[in-house]
Amino acid sequence: MLRRKKALETMQDKSDAHRPVFTGADPDEGLGSEAFRAIDRMREALSARVTGGISPAAVALAYFDWSIHLASAPGKRLELIDKAMRKTARLYAWLLMAGMHPDTPLCIEPLPGDSRFRDDIWRQPPFSFYAQSFLMAQQWWHNVTHEVPGVSPHHENVVSFIARQLLDTVSPSNLPFTNPEVIRKTIETGGANFLRGWQNWQEDITRLATNQPPAGAEKFAVGRDVAATPGKVVFRNHLIELIQYAPATETVLAEPVLIVPAWIMKYYILDLSPHNSLIRYLVEQGHTVFCVSWRNPTAADRDLTLDDYRRMGVMEALDAIAAILPGRKVHATGYCLGGTLLAIAAAAMAHGAAHGPDDRLATITLMAAQTDFTEPGELALFIDHSQMHFLESMMWNRGYLSEDQMAGAFQLLRTNDLVWSRHVHDYLMGERTPMNDLMAWNADSTRMPYRMHAEYLQRLYLGNELAAGCFMVEGRAAALQNIRAPMFVVGTERDHVAPWRSVYKLHQITDTDITFVLTSGGHNAGIVSEPGHSHRHYRIALHRDADPYIGPDEWLKASALQEGSWWPAWSRWLAANSGEERVPPPPMGAARKGYKPLGDAPGSYVFQK
């Protein structure tokens, strides 16, 4: 046997001696493959200016997948013909009944959240027929684009989304001669609404062309009307300013709160007007609050990485707090992408390095933040391998993802709320939607550096590395299962960025106690939900590590609805996980340790354009 093994090894060695050896370098490379790739990237970057950042290849792939499978599914086509005939018959039967009995119930109701036809005038003929016909067509096209045998779920969602966008362009609510509200306004004003609408449109176009904020945003000046909670910048590096807020009570809880907002937004979403500022609320409840204010990156920051954001953002902020408040643990809080980054940092800290685990976190709060990206909501429509290559080319050309490209994607997700409703209200009705602090903040957008955003999309959205436990930080796996600090997790009912069932998946990938809150509202308004805000409610339940797992729908049924804001419940939870003894407020910064105050809040980074 030994001789046979040796003979085989000798034969293998001789065979290998005649094989070509590839060292990774191609002798025929010439100019280098990167030069040829640059040509493709430039072409795609130019195409993006025409397509608004949407990859034509991604759309074409989805269309071909759907159309080929529909063409080869005679049963599905017969089903659609049958549905079309039935819907038409039901519509005309309703029309006849409504002609004889005006109080006849509608044959189809709008989808939840669709307020285009809520005015009672839409129930009067002929406008009721317009609305009902449109809703029937919308339902039929949903049938056309769904449940086609063999179509991939992602392509099905893309085709359905595009069909819905195209159908909305001919909605009777968007056309001046089929919208009874516009007709009524025209009669009342003698047509002056169209003149005012033309003026509104001109003003908006001018402001857009000259890079000015939308009309009315000047009423919400940063540092005066919003982001006005008193404080000091106590640390600054190339990526962040760390703001420490002045105390508002004679004594405070010993453990401070660190807030890590998303770098896709200006931080003051959590410090809006005094009446709805989450930061001011925490300070008034006796918490010492620190908040990260992210730099607005430029083309020079194109090579910043996701790990740079973790290291220079979360970890250096924790180092500064440790110098100012030595020996005290921190209630770390992350919102949106900031919550995802905080989860990565916390998992890496829990694993530890040569010096063992880093136990500086008392608790972790994640607000509308995903850690599992298998069901990321409609935002995933813009993220697949084809679209990712297109996005990378756009960012490669500029060095960053611009604010207008991000805003365009979010507007597409909510065209009824963000595009068509404004078209009707501001341009056809000739009125102006009153500006509020949240709308002014939303217009104050930021950019994202090329390399960081590419890594974020590739590793989290496409690779789902964090949930899989294979997201590497400094050569070690940042596994969420290693986190032992108790967690407070917030999802919002109508979140189109981080759907609450996706946020809920954290229960499956951690081994710690989780207090989960589901609050009314969307991604922003659900978080900015101050006490006293009307029509607010939430559900809350504690899931201990030893408890059996229950699914999100089961959790929803078992959790009682509570009226009001979830902020007080969170403040009580923070207090329950803090030391019992309250202490005098700490000094602002620590000058002897290199963290002297550098200026007043809100700092300088928030003003970067």
Image: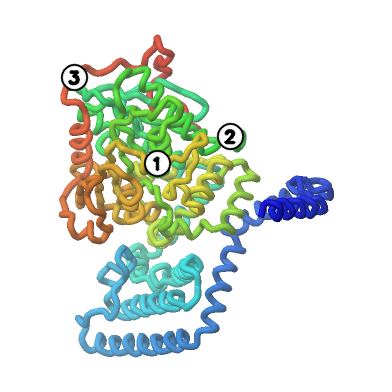
**Number of callouts in the render?**
3
User: What residue is pinned by disc 2?
Assistant: 301
Residue 596, labelled with which disc?
none
Near mark 2 (Cα within 10 A), the count class, few <14, some 14-19 or many ≥20, is some
**Colour mode?**
rainbow
- Kindly indicate the quadrant of the structure image that contains residue 530: top left
Disc 3/disc 1 C-alpha distance (Å):
32 Å
Q: Nearer the viewer, mark 3 or mark 1?
A: 3
Quadrant in the picture for residue 116: bottom left
Mark linked to residue 441: 1
Of residues 541 and 87, the one nearer the viewer is: 541
| Image position, residue 59 (x, y; %) | 56, 65
Q: Are marks 3 and 1 in contact (CB under 8 Å)?
A: no
Please provide percent x and percent y for residue 41. 68, 51
Q: Which label's residue is closer to the chain start, 2 or 3?
A: 3
Q: Is residue 245 above or below residue 374?
A: above
Provide residue 27's location: percent of width, then percent of height: 83, 47
Question: How many angstroms separate mark 2 from mark 1 (CA)?
Answer: 24 Å
| Amino acid type at image mark 2 | Asp
Residue hosting label 3: 250
User: What kind of element bears circle 3?
Assistant: loop
Residue 360, image quadrant: top left
The numbered mark, 2 or 1, whose residue comes first in the sequence reads 2
Mark 2 or mark 1, whichever is nearer to me: 2
